[in-house]
Image (tube, rainbow, N blue to C red):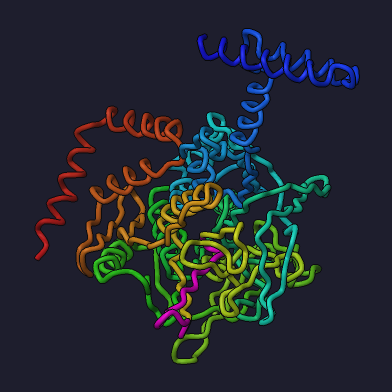
Amino acid sequence: EEEEEEEEEVAKMMISSTAANHQKIMPSSLARKKSFFFESFRGRRRPSLRADTRASTSSKRAPSPKKVVVLGGGFGGLYCALKLDALSWREKNGEQPKPIVTLIDANETFLFKPLMYELLTLDMEETEVAPSYEELLQNTTVRFVRKEATKIVPDTILTTKSGTKVSGTGGEVIVRDALTNEEERVKYDYLVVSLGAKVDFESEKNFVKGAKEFAIPFNGLEDVKEMQKRIERLKEVKEDEKTVAVVGAGYAGVELALCLARWFEREDGLKDVKIKLVAKDGELLRSATTGGKTAARKALGKASNLEILDGTVGAIERSTNGINSSSSSSSNSSSSPDENTKLNIFLTKSDLSSETLENVDMCCWTVGLTAKLPTSETDWPFEQDQRTGKIITDSTLKVAGYDRVFALGDNSIQREHEKTKGKSTSEESEEKPATAQVAFQAADYCAWNVWSAINKRPLLPFRYQHLGDMMTLGNKEAAVQFPIGEEATLDGPAAFALRRLAYLYRMPTNEQRFKIGRKWLSAIRANPSAFVEEVIEGVNLYTSRE
């Protein structure tokens, strides 16, 4: 108050002095300004000026939220979006507010792919394995758009002297509605590409005559439903010999063949179905550990209705000796099959001899996965690896040349540069395994790096930590390969329980964990002694090995 009184006295002296010297020549406008100047010092400390200053400072401290668009709702895309929503976004001291996250996928539901086998054999329900995005995102701020991404248009693209395209801006994603075919433009400041993989029937590398028309891929929810429909029809077929072929002997092929075999053994109408597992060079689980291969072969040996065949598929044709040969004789052999179509599958063995599987009732296809990306360079401006067709990223998952675009999962490949004395000497592309485990880990890193890029913090390099592998062996058995050696593998009912718990933990939301966990606990409570006996039996088998 004393300072204000002193300021007022000084102001009075300045005003009176000025008025005495310039009273005769002072214009009326300046006189009004004099009055305002005097009043501004009377009992107040210029509140309007300070309010304006605070408003200006506040506007600087509250930037508009960034728009983050995530393409693909698989493990990589969905988990990245959920992580972005869960991260701490401080809206103080000029830091960026929480971004507007939009998840775009052509499907209505998420698919927990490691549990597709249980869904196929009716051991789990669709709502457990394939919950809707609306349900998973209901307690978040993530916006979901059910449309297909067809094109990406960055706001600015520059071309360097070497011809490399670069961009440091946002852009637009053009999406299309599958039902109406209408297009929409979705604006982004930061983009995450995680579209996953698709079954490739058409490229020169993977093309097999008749495969697209007659084989059923095993990669999505619609594939599972189609197989279930064919199997139901198979129950009605009154024949002595019924055959199902599974092409491919990687993890997906072996797990699918075992689940079908063990299911058919106990299902009326399917007990006489034979399973033919087609393995290139007769080799199973090429990337598995020794212990994993041993557990798989032991389980395959238990299935009396399953046979392993050496060979690669050269062509698939409609059989002329099938049960519906009379109805199909008038149609072209390359036309789309119905549920009763019998097939001939032509194999080439490792010794170059030939073999034909005749009158096959259903052909399941587990090979030929490729990155799910548009092939046109104008639609997809990012650099792609010539060998795999995947988007090239650096170690932080940032797309080469694009500061605001990240990619992860089955549609990306990391390329790292080795440097000596500050100069790049060589480059090496690292292709991670196409597994859910890789996508889980990459999603966390990608979300953190998007957060860091928005807040202008250092980005972290993605370092994949292999935690082992798990596979189902059918009939409530599984194999868990620990990352501590070639032989460290647990199989049987105990591994089945461990696998279930691991996937329960990996469910995308707490609500989904609770829903599935409650059902599993109910099943254990219904017969706890049987569950305990199965676990003890599995542990005893594991510990008794030499």
Residue 314 visible, this orientation: yes
Residue 457 in picture, x, y percent from top left: 48, 52
Residue 467 relative to residue 71: left or right: left
Quarter the C terminus occupies: bottom left
State the residue at coordinates (85%, 21%): 30
261 in relation to 400, above or below: above
Residue 363 in picture, x, y percent from top left: 56, 65
Magenta highlight range:
409-425
In the rendered image, residue 413 lying in the magenta stretch gets the answer yes
State the residue at coordinates (42%, 68%): 250
* Magenta segment, prevailing SS (helix, strand or loop): strand
Toward the viewer: 416 or 44?
44
Residue 486 placement: quadrant: bottom left
327 in relation to 15, above or below: below
Residue 10 in picture, x, y percent from top left: 62, 16
Residue 319 visible, this orientation: no
215 in relation to 387, above or below: above
In the rendered image, residue 417 lying in the magenta stretch gets the answer yes
Toward the viewer: 184 or 526?
184
